[in-house]
Amino acid sequence: MSGLGKGIVSSSITKIMIMHGLKSLPMKFDGYLNYDCGTMNPFRHGEVFVLDDKGEVDMDFGNYERFINRDLDSSLSITGGKLFSEIISRERKGEFLGRDVQIIPQMTDFILNKVKAIARDKKLDIMVIEVGGTVGDIENSYFIEAMRQLALKEKVVFVNVAYVPELQVVGEQKTKPTQLAIRELMESGIQADFIVCRSDRALDKSAKEKIALFSNLDEKHIIDNPDLKSIYDVPVSLIDQGFDRMMLEELDIVGTKIDNAELSKWKDYAQSISAKHKKTVRISIVGKYITLKDSYASVKEALIHSAGAEAVNLDLNWIESERLEGVTENKIKEILGGSDGILVPGGFGSRGIEGMIKAIEFARENKIPYLGLCLGMQLMSIEFARNVSNIKGANSGEFDPSAKDKVIDLMGSQKDIKSKGGTMRLGAWKARIRNGTYAYQAYKSGIISERHRHRYEFNNRYAHKLERDGLVISARTLDGNIIEMVEWKDQFGIGTQAHPELKSRLEKPAPLFLAFIEASMGKRH
Ligand code: GLN
């Protein structure tokens, strides 16, 4: 079922295979009929992840990239929507002339051809395919059927990620949901080769025996996947159980060896995250999707990566921005007072905006380091315009289309766009950073590339006035037209139109997040 951590397991398997020197990439099937994740509400589906190539994909891609430290492309994401739209357009062109078009074989062949083409084009040794959803769902049934067929022709290992809940009152691990999952998969014609069991703690012997019995498997093939200190400990836990060795055996791949230098490097990074450090840094995240933490998955992980690299404990203070609206200064101080750093992440729509602006004002006035991501950069500009440049009605066209002073406005290129899917300014864009700025210090480079997802931008008409009043415009697009970053002059506060969190990896934390954590530790002023 969703939320179980199939993404972490897939990421870990891919990582381990790469450590074995095998060319490996993950691929994801999602059964929903949306073409991509771009139009999905973060409250319902978690964060929308954006790739360099503009693909708006499932948040699992964030985990894939964070684990394997490679940029992926959107051909690796196959949704029901993409499949149906392609297959129907081919039918209209007459490609199936004379035939009725069916799930089996046309749709399943279509999936198989895609998988094979990707494996061939990218010259992969192993492809790790994650089938989203729950076995038994109508949504993913044609993906599962395609995988059954794949196994008739290729070497395939099936891993069933299953849930083993523990009823606190009885103190017993219940294997029934896993038994049902195994049976359901068998009804689809698939015998799992491994069962990865998600549970609070490692499986009891009796639970393991039971699952082995129901799945026709040796007990060694029942893999523990208990709660660990961090998700980055999962690959190591799988290796410790011999999962990599057994899986390669099943795949008839012999003679590979794990690269111990790579493994110990990974372990060091993972360890720096779960270790208890002397110092703690308290970061307040002020947003509107706080009740579903998955909406900010990449922001959270980026902070974790940087805190680990700086050997500091991370204390995350999640604040629903509406709590800062219509309350006294004292109340705001009570909520934000203990923050070492304040962060406003991306978002859409007008709910909770004024609360975020209050948080930014609090950071600026109390010299608390601030990081604004996309919307957080736009609001940083609005706050400055209102409270420093005295443009009282400063706003964004997104929240008040009739505002007189739209310091943030719809991008010119967006004005005639009506349809919503895939039409924002998306993907990787380069920017040039001004020398001598906090941003330059963070990136240590003049030209950078980060991923984007927005329709609004800093209105150049206000650039002069705000700069004169002390706002630093620290980066622009290479053509100079779009303002990419702004910052405060004599205190650490940076807003970026991009989403640097999307490129932060355990082994390569995002430079802006590193700088932000350092500033929050009092290392940068
Ligand atoms: N809503 C803003 C825009 O579209 C910010 C988007 C974001 O934060 N990703 O420009």
Image: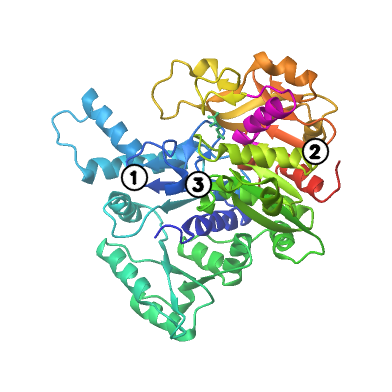
Q: Nearer the viewer, residue 71 or 319?
A: 319
The residue type indicated by label 2 comes to Phe
Q: At numbered mark 2, what does the secondary structure look like: helix, strand or loop?
A: loop
Mark 2 or 3: in front is 2
- The residue that mark 3 highlights is 59
- The residue that mark 1 highlights is 32
Percent position (x, y) of residue 431? 69, 24
Q: Is residue 26 left or right of residue 240?
A: left
The residue type indicated by label 1 comes to Tyr
Residue 492 has which mark? 2
* Label 3 Cα neighbours within 10 Å, binned few <14 / some 14-19 / many ≥20: many
**Mark 1 / mark 2, whichever is N-terminal:** 1
- Residue drawn at the location 41% of the way across and 56% of the way down: 155
Give the image quarter of residue 449.
top right
Q: Which residues are magenta?
A: 373-392
- Residue drawn at the location 59% of the way across and 37% of the way down: 354
Question: Is residue 451 something one can see in this rendering?
Answer: yes
- Residue drawn at the location 62% of the way across and 40% of the way down: 356
Percent position (x, y) of residue 325? 59, 43
Q: Quadrant of the N terminus?
A: bottom left
Q: Is residue 277 left or right of residue 497?
A: right
Spatial CA span between label 2 and label 3: 30 Å
- Residue drawn at the location 46% of the way across and 62% of the way down: 4
Percent position (x, y) of residue 194? 43, 68
